[in-house]
Image (cartoon, grey):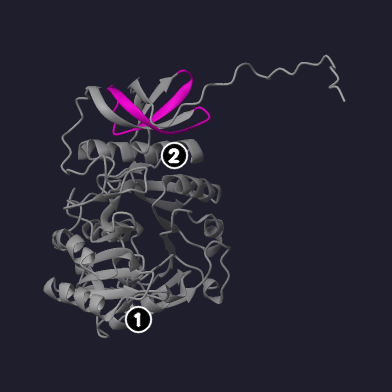
Amino acid sequence: MAKRDTGLRFQPAGGSKAVAVPTGKKQRLHIERLANDGRGIAFVDGRTWFVAGALADEDVEARVLGARSQVVEARAERIFTSSAQRRVTPCAHAGQCGGCTLQHLPHSEQLALKQRTLAEQLLRVAAAAPEEWAPPLVGPEFGYRRRARIAVRWDVKSKQLAVGFRAAASQDIVAIADCPVLVQPLQTLLSALPEVLRGLRKPQALGHVEVFSGTAMALLVRHTAPLGEEDVAHLQHFCQAQSAQLWLQGEGDPQPQQADAELGYRLESWNLQLAYRPGDFVQVNGPVNEAMIAQALAWLAPQADERVLDLFCGLGNFALPLAQRVAEVVAVEGVATMVARAQQNALSNGLENLHFYQADLSNPLDGAWMQKGFSAVLLDPPRDGAFAVVKQIAALGAERVLYVSCNPATLARDTAELLKQGYRLKRAGILDMFPQTAHVEAMALFERG
């Protein structure tokens, strides 16, 4: 049957379609300013370009990593006009490794960027600013990280094991000879690790590797297939030479090769020692963690006769120091194994005025422990924030709320809720837990009325 001509002609609505930007294309750009994540922002043909490794007022040549709609993600590969702020990166792997994205920016400017990010989020989302801005809480710029995950991948074609850190915006692995943000003992361990892993008879069984430094050094080897006795002995010999514990993890939880192995960290200012196991959440920056606890106690000003609530308590990082200052601490955590670990940490440190409970803190609070109320609340939630429990803070009777955040966006959202409940934002400031990155941690104090 012949096709009938209806005389209709369909035209695209809204004008001509924009030409796609292909991955790998190079483009010369002028960088206008920095985004909150430290990437440079440029504008070309109605598109917004986010350029890793670029600074404000620079002219660069960038390679496209990906594009969607009117947003292009790219990486600076050539600098034509350099910013006066640009510095020589201290690490030879900067720009390739995906771990540290701001090494080309002086530390003082990194702090200023993080401060702006926090202030902008509070103003935009909560229409708020603190009555007092605290100075940034800082520690060492390098040599601070006491935990790291090492990527490994077996290449079937070359029959080689790649060992290192994930590349920026890629699943590729960058071979790392040294990492200046690691604490010194882990730098020594890392430098010897690739050769040891490549010496295994079955390296293709490796999943990933983690290294830890605290009261002891430890190496966790995650394997996707059972390791042979010879390979386990090979790893044990290496760990003995490095004075490190060896932990293995197959399908279950990590297990130490020595039954009496203990891993932990100390809070020297409070004469406390907290035990943990690989897989537990631990603040990676020891000096800033201690300074953060001290600042939290100073801001919250707990009194000897008070009952204090610690939400998202983890291992007891805040709860144990708090218990030395107040009559009672109620600590709540969502992960059962962490609750058990926190209880043991309290007992081993001789603290009997702590009571630990497990609860899903993504839902409203519900428990008999709420009935007596609290003078003060401290919360340290994950990136999702604590909106469900924040909506109940006023009902707990708390006069003071100390909020430790790892995400300014959810902190700003929860701040708006606390303001609705009659609290005022008394003080806020950033915590430089991750120098050389754009990751922002913050602390905020709220007082009723």
Question: Could you tell me which residue is drawn at 24 percent across and 56 percent down?
Answer: 288
Picture layout, residue 91 above or below residue 4: below
Q: Are marks 1 and 2 in contact (CB under 8 Å)?
A: no
Q: Position of residue 30 (x, y in %)?
A: 33, 20
Residue 121: image tag: 2
Q: Residue furthest bottom?
A: 259
Task: Please indicate, yes or no, whether residue 230 appears anywhere in the rendered image.
Answer: yes
Question: Could you tell me which residue is drawn at 74 percent across and 18 percent down?
Answer: 10
Q: Position of residue 171 (x, y in %)?
A: 37, 49
Mark 1 crowd level (few <14, some 14–19, many ≥20, 10 Å Cα) = some
Q: Position of residue 173 (x, y in %)?
A: 30, 50
Q: In the image, which residues are magenta?
A: 45-70
Q: Amino acid at mark 1?
A: Gln
Picture layout, residue 66 above or below residue 166: above
Secondary element at tag 2: helix
Q: Amino acid at mark 2?
A: Gln
| Image position of 252 (left or right of 148) | right
Secondary element at tag 1: helix
Any magenta on residue 52?
yes
For the residues labelled 1 and 2, the Cα–Cα distance comes to 38 Å
Question: Could you tell me which residue is drawn at 26 percent across and 42 percent down?
Answer: 96
Mark 2 crowd level (few <14, some 14–19, many ≥20, 10 Å Cα) = many
